[in-house]
Image (cartoon, rainbow, N blue to C red):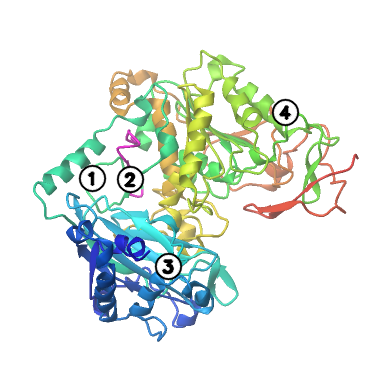
Amino acid sequence: HLQKQLTPRLGSMLYKTSADNLQQPARYRPNRDDTSALADSSIRFKMAGSLLSTVKNLVIVASVAAVLILTLAFSQEKEFDNSSESSASRILSQWLDPKTVEAKAHKRAETFFFARDGDTQGLFKPTEVIVEIVNPKRKGYSVTIVSEGRYTGVATFVGIDISTGNNVYSWIPSFPDDSYQILVHELNGEISPGEKGSPLIHPSPLQFSIQLADVQNANDHFNAVLKERLSMPPCQSIEERFDGYSRWNGDWIGPETKLDVGKIRTGWGFLPSREMGCKIETFSKEDLLSIPEKKSIYVIGTSRERGVFLSLVDMLLEPKEKEHFGDSVVGQCWGRAVVEKGNMKVSYQDFRANSFEQPDDLGAIQCHNDKVVRGGLQSNGSMLGNATAFWNELFEDETMWPDVIYLLSGHKTNDFNFEAHTLSFAQNIPPSWRGTLIIGDYEFNAKRAGLDRNRQGYQDALIKMLDVISDPRVRWLDGEGISTEQRMYAERGEEQVSLSQHFHHLCEENNLYLPSGERMSSDVMRVCSNITEIVAQLLVGHALGPKDAFHKAVSQYPAKDKPDMTLTVCHDCPKELLPFHITPHPVLTCTTGKFHPRTKEEMDNVVVSKDSPPQKCPCLSQSVDYSFSSQSDVIHVRECKSAY
């Protein structure tokens, strides 16, 4: 038993670290003097060297001696908090004595870190950073690794120590750096009395460094690995069956690095892992305005996917054209929106796949708050039926077929039916269509942000569904994977990690600053989100093809054939979120020229149902079945159980 508990930790010898070495940059320091507002937790930070040979020679008879050695090592370490309860020797005894788990229920949570070298041939020293949370709260934690302006990533939850109840997280480095920091946020805590949020656990962040290992040819090996990742084929060039998007994995590289990873407008870029197998090429506004032939991208989903649509439009426009982009009629659209400039057309359709009924129950009435969302007497009675009609509309006119479709499925929602809610759409794509369908799901979410613990099971489910679809034109985006690394930088910032929010926000609303300290200009960027913009770039890549071939085609395009650059905006955007609806063949209102603030007349002219107004929920006296949050409201759902 002792050997099982100690072996993972005997790969490292702890050494003392002065509290003076723990740097807390002003960017992350709480802007208040009352430290009681911080999470009731403390952090201890331990770095480790390699004792791999000791581990290899460890035998059971040496376990008792090992306990004594480690106990001495812990007892000699300096504690960095003011709690008399938090001695390192007591922590070690908790590792060894499961009986202490019950007693810890009334103690405050404590967090400690250590690093270890588990591989003598590894590229880095240390090869792994371990984060353990003692006395963890049930609410969970977000563990982030950052290097200001250079890198952001997360430590992965690997399990719960069954003998102690500790939460254990692991982070494997990909790059050497002298200024890594560990930040631990408590989920669903309080950032101030009565204010919910994700407080940063005191006194994090803590700083550490990753160096190239002192082994032969380590530098050459690292450069070779990096070159291989930078030289992978463009993702959009892979024409055969491909599941790389379903196992999204890689590194976010910041603007203060010189790596050519296809950076977006904030200066950040995503470098996929070798396992993912391709690189993401990025395109400029000039690229989008020089397209030699008509291209169309369709984004179909909820407000989260709408952020991708808004990033696409933002990438396409001149500064004066998007001055009122945020408060325009399409800035918050719960219907249909189409933006066209030059040879690029970008469209959005609100598509609440979590409200789809089962195919054998199309007449069932479901209410959102006081309105019927499906079933009943109104003309748009079936959400699934109208979704299917809209899908068929996309492929009615071959000259108008989109080149790329990003489609939200209902996967990871309560009533998801793969065959009826996703497979039926994929199977209705015309055989002659030469575009790309990228399917997403409800794990593309700034609130969940990859915090679910069954990552492998989720990815395996995506692969199985792709196998059933069996169409090389179809990809499935790993929502957990793409959400997790940027979880601190969503709409509400790092203190709201666990709350409902979008990835995207208007840049000037959040006073976004570049690493240089300069304020992000709305002339450059109106919609701020690394996540929605990297997905937007992914869609553009599939529409335009590999970048080298695209630039070659542009250079051969006659200047006299350049398209009209007038901005055209068309919409069917209702003034209210509820009831959710999908309207096939809507009557669009169109304008030309730059965006303008939405007007009451524009909103009043949109009618959700052309034949009848939204129906009042007939079962309001019935108890609520379940609720969920949206950007504008909390939605209370009732499944009417009686005939009306």
Q: Main secondary structure of the magenta part?
A: loop
The answer to whether the residue labelled 1 contacts the one labelled 2, judged by CB atoms less than 8 Å apart, is yes
Residue 321 seen in the figure: no
Where residue 259 is drawn, which disc sits there?
A: 1
Mark 3 in CB contact with mark 2 (< 8 angstroms): no
Give the residue pinned by disc 3: 133
Disc 1 and disc 4 in contact, CB within 8 angstroms: no
* Label 4 to label 2: alpha-carbon separation: 40 Å
Residue drawn at x 56%, y 16% is: 430
Q: Which of the two labelled residues, at mark 4 and mark 3, occupies the earlier sequence position?
A: 3
Crowding around mark 3 (Cα neighbors within 10 Å: few <14, some 14 to 19, many 20+) is: many
- At label 4, the amino acid type is Gly
Nearest to the eye among marks 4 and 3: give it: 3
- Residue with the mark numbered 4: 385
Which of the two discs, 4 and 2, sits closer to the camera? 4
| First to last magenta residue range | 266-281
Quarter of the image with the C terminus in it: top right
- Residue type (three-letter) at the residue carrying disc 1: Leu
- Callout 2: 10 Å neighbours few (<14), some, many (20+)? many
Q: Is residue 231 visible?
A: yes
Residue 143 lies, with reference to residue 353, above or below; the image says below
Q: Which residue is mark 2?
A: 269
Mark nearest the camera among 3 and 2 is 3
Q: Amino acid at mark 2?
A: Gly
Q: From the viewer's side, name the closer residue of 612 and 354.
A: 354
